[in-house]
Image: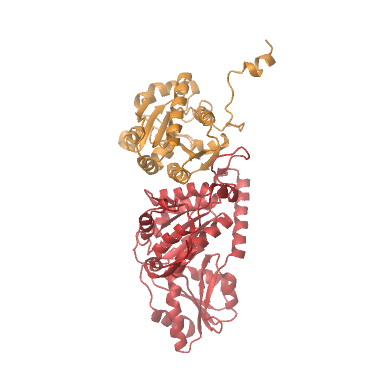
Amino acid sequence: MELNEIISPENLVYDKPRLMNDNPMHYCPGCSHGVIHKLIAEVIDEMGLEEKTIGISPVGCAVFAYNYLNIDWIEAAHGRAPAVATAAKRLNPDRMVFTYQGDGDLAAIGTAETIHAANRGENIVIVFVNNAIYGMTGGQMAPTTLEGMPTSTTPYGRSIALNGHPLKIGELLAKLEGTCLVTRQSVHTAAAVKKAKKVLRKAFENAMNKKGTSVVEFVSTCASGWKTTPDKANKWMVENMFPFYPLGDLKNKEEGIGI
Amino acid sequence: MSEEIKLLKGNEAIAYAAIRYGTDGYFGYPITPQSEVLETLMAEMPWETTGMVVLQAESEVAAINMVYGGAATGKRVMTSSSSPGISLKLEGISYLAGADLPCLIVNVMRGGPGLGTIQPSQADYFQTVKGGGHGDYRLITLAPSSVQEMADFVGLGFDLAFKYANPAIILADGIVGQMMEKVVLPPYRARKTEEEIRQENPWAARGKTADRKPNIITSLELDAAMMEENNLRFQAKYKKIEENEVRYEEFQCDDAEYLLIAFGSSARICQKVVELARAEGIKLGLLRPITLWPFPTKAIAAYADKVKGMLSVELNAGQMVEDVRLAVNGKIKVEHYGRLGGIIFTPDEILEALKETIINQ
């Protein structure tokens, strides 16, 4: 078979999502952000929400999320995305408003905004990328950094005595009355990607149907921050991250929070 | 509905005017001496009449970021606070300015620094007109001296904010916020429709339609050359505002040999000083800047050729006096008189200070 035959449209089994553009991505090789961006783009398109979606990008590696998805975006100050999303959704209740935040943004500097938006049951989706490290600033300790895990600010490994415990913010959010869905996913295998997409769609539906706050956490890799290769990062994540941050639904209230 | 006359506190007037102006959203956090703004809005329940959203945020930081989120979607949104709360909001205010977002902020000033006092002060002048937050930005600053102006400046503040795509701030103080006066509330204006918002604010992030590129609201630009371009664009906007939006009021200035310069509640007290001085045969006038930025530099510079001296009367340690001196440029004597930490001056002590530091020098 000639190349031109192979790439002819009828033979295509996979295509780049329509809402993703051709801007070169700044993410490092092996980073989970690209796959998660792709899933969001696919779900928005499949649900026909392009004209209704407002994305809130964070400060951190995903600050430039707005460069890659062809939707309207608001770039928030560090940690404040849930507050920004609160107003965007309350003032425009028929829109689909989601935040896209890393562990430092969501679980350190923005803890108050995260907990209170979720506790009010804002009808938004919080996409939470947890790779246990500050990627953008060069690999410092995150609130979710595991015990013993070396980072540039815990060069001898995270010490509980010195730095406290890694924060299981997902479990915390699942306890709040305002959340209808709190789930922990990953995108390291095809099966995981498929499952994560289904859950993401459920979260977007919850926001449109005003069922309360949905939190979709992605346990993710940061090969550069972890100072390893993409392949080894995936293995390290399975062996070290998953035992502490087990995958699955932490909460899934079908009927919503009942406001 | 038409105008209505009421007896209100300044803070209450802000709330009523906001509803009548067609404001889309208010986001605030309680702090003395301005909590009546949020309390009045919650009691009035405008979400059931005009559809205005009112939300008590978890912090001043969250409140200003809610304003950022609402403004980014092209809505008319506001917040209010008092000095320590405004300090917390400054990060968000810088982001609003850096993203060309219109909104209205109210600061009912109290004495500082730190937790300070809950009594009135004007010590946030520098913070408001010289930046406050990081970066080269300006806030359109309106200084009300009556309850009527508290109501009127809500509409004016929003109009100027949207005209220039820039945050506007009402810089009031605890006196104007807490005192009660007769006020004429404006007629109701409808909130903007979806169609009007899309037409008037084509930049707003409201969901991307097929006919345009994505709207991205951000203040971030890592390319220094482009960030300089952004800054030059801000400066051009500020120059236009300085040329077109200066507002001030003159009180018995025509034949004046001496001038008081005062804003907000200090200007109300200074009206009495003018009366007392004139009863003694001293030809005293009062110039009241209404916009603190843009500052009435030209008007004050013109008086430097006519009067013998000026006294800047402020409830602070001498802040606006620096702008008065810049305007006067050394031509005549300019002094400052102030009380600090929540103490309010009497007309007599101001007149005494005028004699001591200006007239008898």
Q: As drawn, which residue projects farthest toward the bottom?
A: B281
Closest to the observer, B296 or B207: B207
> What residue is rendered at 42% in x and 64% in y?
B13
Residue B175 position in % (x across, y down): 38, 68
User: Which residue extends farthest front?
Assistant: B1
Q: Please state the total of marks drawn on the protein image.
A: 0
Residue B12: where, in percent of width, then height?
Answer: 39, 62
Q: Position of residue A258 (x, y in %)?
A: 34, 37
Tell me, yes or no, if residue B317 can be seen here: no
Measuring 57% from the left and 67% from the top, which residue is drawn there?
B246
Residue B323 x, y percent position in the rendering:
53, 69
Chain letter for the red colouring in the rendering: B
- Residue A71 at least partly seen: yes
Of A109 and B55, the residue lying toward us: B55
Residue placed most toward the observer, B101 or B195 = B195
Q: In the figure, what tint was chain A given? A: orange
* Relative to B275, residue B324 above or below: above
Does residue B216 appear to the left or right of B265 in the view shown?
right
Give me the residue at 41% from left, 54% from top. B46
Q: How has the structure been colored for display? A: by chain
Nearest to the observer: residue A124 or residue A192: A124
Q: Is residue B206 above or below residue B116?
A: above
Q: Residue at x 59, y 23 (%)?
A: A15
